Amino acid sequence: MSQAIKALDQLISSMQPDLHAQPYVYCCLEAVRVDQVADLQPLATINEVEGMTLIIPLHIAEDRELTYQGPYAAITLNVHSSLDAVGLTAAVAGELAKHEISANMLAGFYHDHILVGWDSRHQAMSALQGMMANR
Protein backbone atom coordinates (compact mmCIF):
# COMPACT_ATOMS: atom_id res chain seq x y z
CA MET A 1 0.00 0.00 0.00
CA SER A 2 1.17 3.53 -0.72
CA GLN A 3 2.58 5.90 1.87
CA ALA A 4 -0.04 7.92 3.76
CA ILE A 5 -0.14 11.56 2.67
CA LYS A 6 -0.14 14.46 5.15
CA ALA A 7 0.31 17.52 2.90
CA LEU A 8 -3.07 19.23 2.42
CA ASP A 9 -2.45 20.44 -1.15
CA GLN A 10 -1.38 16.96 -2.20
CA LEU A 11 -4.38 15.37 -0.46
CA ILE A 12 -6.84 17.69 -2.19
CA SER A 13 -5.28 17.40 -5.63
CA SER A 14 -5.27 13.59 -5.32
CA MET A 15 -8.70 13.03 -3.70
CA GLN A 16 -10.28 11.10 -6.61
CA PRO A 17 -13.79 11.09 -5.09
CA ASP A 18 -15.84 7.98 -5.82
CA LEU A 19 -19.62 8.07 -5.47
CA HIS A 20 -21.13 4.82 -4.17
CA ALA A 21 -24.09 3.62 -6.25
CA GLN A 22 -26.41 2.68 -3.40
CA PRO A 23 -28.06 4.96 -0.84
CA TYR A 24 -27.24 4.60 2.86
CA VAL A 25 -29.16 5.48 6.00
CA TYR A 26 -28.36 6.09 9.66
CA CYS A 27 -29.97 3.81 12.25
CA CYS A 28 -29.52 3.57 15.99
CA LEU A 29 -29.96 0.26 17.80
CA GLU A 30 -29.88 -0.19 21.57
CA ALA A 31 -28.11 -2.98 23.44
CA VAL A 32 -26.36 -4.61 20.49
CA ARG A 33 -22.78 -5.71 19.77
CA VAL A 34 -20.94 -5.35 16.48
CA ASP A 35 -21.07 -9.12 15.86
CA GLN A 36 -24.87 -8.95 16.10
CA VAL A 37 -25.19 -6.39 13.29
CA ALA A 38 -22.73 -7.74 10.71
CA ASP A 39 -25.59 -9.04 8.56
CA LEU A 40 -26.79 -5.44 8.17
CA GLN A 41 -23.63 -4.77 6.11
CA PRO A 42 -22.70 -1.54 7.90
CA LEU A 43 -20.43 0.94 6.19
CA ALA A 44 -19.62 2.14 9.72
CA THR A 45 -20.64 1.63 13.31
CA ILE A 46 -20.23 4.05 16.18
CA ASN A 47 -20.89 3.14 19.80
CA GLU A 48 -22.59 5.90 21.71
CA VAL A 49 -24.17 6.03 25.15
CA GLU A 50 -27.64 6.01 23.58
CA GLY A 51 -26.95 2.99 21.37
CA MET A 52 -24.99 1.86 18.34
CA THR A 53 -25.19 4.12 15.31
CA LEU A 54 -25.04 2.17 12.06
CA ILE A 55 -24.69 3.45 8.53
CA ILE A 56 -26.28 0.76 6.40
CA PRO A 57 -27.70 0.32 2.88
CA LEU A 58 -31.22 1.71 2.57
CA HIS A 59 -32.66 -1.53 1.17
CA ILE A 60 -31.51 -3.46 4.25
CA ALA A 61 -33.08 -0.94 6.63
CA GLU A 62 -36.33 -1.17 4.69
CA ASP A 63 -36.24 -4.99 4.51
CA ARG A 64 -35.72 -5.16 8.30
CA GLU A 65 -38.28 -2.41 8.95
CA LEU A 66 -35.74 -0.38 10.92
CA THR A 67 -36.30 3.25 11.84
CA TYR A 68 -33.77 5.35 9.97
CA GLN A 69 -32.73 8.79 8.82
CA GLY A 70 -31.74 9.37 5.23
CA PRO A 71 -31.09 8.50 2.49
CA TYR A 72 -27.49 9.60 2.09
CA ALA A 73 -24.89 9.13 -0.60
CA ALA A 74 -21.45 7.88 0.39
CA ILE A 75 -18.42 9.37 -1.31
CA THR A 76 -14.99 7.84 -0.76
CA LEU A 77 -11.88 9.97 -1.22
CA ASN A 78 -9.48 7.57 -2.89
CA VAL A 79 -6.31 9.14 -1.58
CA HIS A 80 -4.37 7.40 1.19
CA SER A 81 -4.74 10.12 3.79
CA SER A 82 -2.72 10.03 6.97
CA LEU A 83 -4.73 9.88 10.16
CA ASP A 84 -2.43 12.72 11.30
CA ALA A 85 -3.15 14.95 8.27
CA VAL A 86 -4.40 18.41 9.18
CA GLY A 87 -7.11 20.25 7.29
CA LEU A 88 -8.62 17.80 4.81
CA THR A 89 -11.86 17.35 6.72
CA ALA A 90 -12.21 21.10 7.22
CA ALA A 91 -11.40 21.88 3.58
CA VAL A 92 -13.87 19.34 2.20
CA ALA A 93 -16.65 20.22 4.64
CA GLY A 94 -16.02 23.92 4.01
CA GLU A 95 -16.22 23.53 0.25
CA LEU A 96 -19.44 21.56 0.49
CA ALA A 97 -20.86 24.14 2.92
CA LYS A 98 -20.27 26.84 0.28
CA HIS A 99 -22.74 24.86 -1.86
CA GLU A 100 -25.11 24.42 1.11
CA ILE A 101 -24.40 20.68 1.27
CA SER A 102 -24.25 19.04 4.67
CA ALA A 103 -21.23 16.75 5.05
CA ASN A 104 -20.95 13.93 7.58
CA MET A 105 -17.27 12.96 7.59
CA LEU A 106 -15.82 9.55 8.51
CA ALA A 107 -12.14 8.69 8.68
CA GLY A 108 -11.10 5.17 7.80
CA PHE A 109 -7.59 3.79 8.19
CA TYR A 110 -6.75 4.47 4.51
CA HIS A 111 -9.43 6.81 3.21
CA ASP A 112 -11.88 9.50 4.22
CA HIS A 113 -15.57 9.08 3.50
CA ILE A 114 -18.33 11.67 3.24
CA LEU A 115 -22.05 11.17 3.54
CA VAL A 116 -24.17 13.81 1.84
CA GLY A 117 -27.90 14.00 1.25
CA TRP A 118 -28.89 11.65 -1.57
CA ASP A 119 -30.36 14.49 -3.62
CA SER A 120 -27.12 16.51 -3.26
CA ARG A 121 -24.77 13.74 -4.40
CA HIS A 122 -24.07 15.00 -7.93
CA GLN A 123 -23.61 18.59 -6.77
CA ALA A 124 -21.21 17.32 -4.06
CA MET A 125 -19.19 15.37 -6.62
CA SER A 126 -18.93 18.46 -8.84
CA ALA A 127 -17.77 20.57 -5.89
CA LEU A 128 -15.11 18.01 -4.92
CA GLN A 129 -13.89 17.66 -8.50
CA GLY A 130 -13.70 21.47 -8.68
CA MET A 131 -11.56 21.50 -5.53
CA MET A 132 -9.16 19.04 -7.15
CA ALA A 133 -8.96 21.04 -10.37
CA ASN A 134 -8.22 24.28 -8.52
CA ARG A 135 -5.13 22.87 -6.72
Image (cartoon, rainbow, N blue to C red):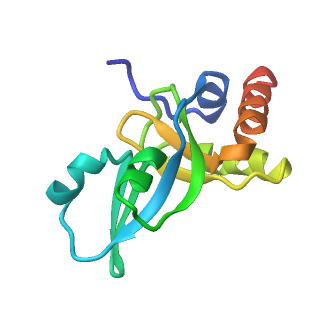
Q: Where on the picture, by quarter, is residue 95?
A: top right
Where in the figure is residue 54, as x and y percent of width and height?
38, 58
Q: Where residue 76 sits: x, y (%)? A: 52, 33
Q: How many marks?
A: 0
Residue drawn at point x = 40 percent, y = 64 percent: 66
Quarter residue 30 falls in:
bottom left
* 32 sits left or right of 97 in the view: left
The front one of 79 and 36 is 36
**75 relative position to 12: left or right:** left
Residue sticking out furthest to the left: 35
Task: Report the side of 39 relative to 113 (left or right).
Answer: left
Residue at image coords 48%, 29%: 5
Give whichever of 49, 108 is nearer the camera.
49
> Which residue is the extreme one toward the bottom?
50
Name above or below for residue 105 compared with residue 50. above
**Is the C terminus in the top left, top right, bottom left or bottom right quadrant?**
top right
For the N terminus, the image quarter is: top left
* Quadrant in which residue 125 is drawn: top right
- Where is 31 relative to 93, above or below? below
- Residue sitting nearer the eye, 40 or 76: 40
The residue shown at (48%, 50%) is 106
* Relative image position of residue 108 (x, y in whole percent): 39, 42
Q: Position of residue 8 (x, y in %)?
A: 62, 35
Residue located 67% across and 23% down the image: 13
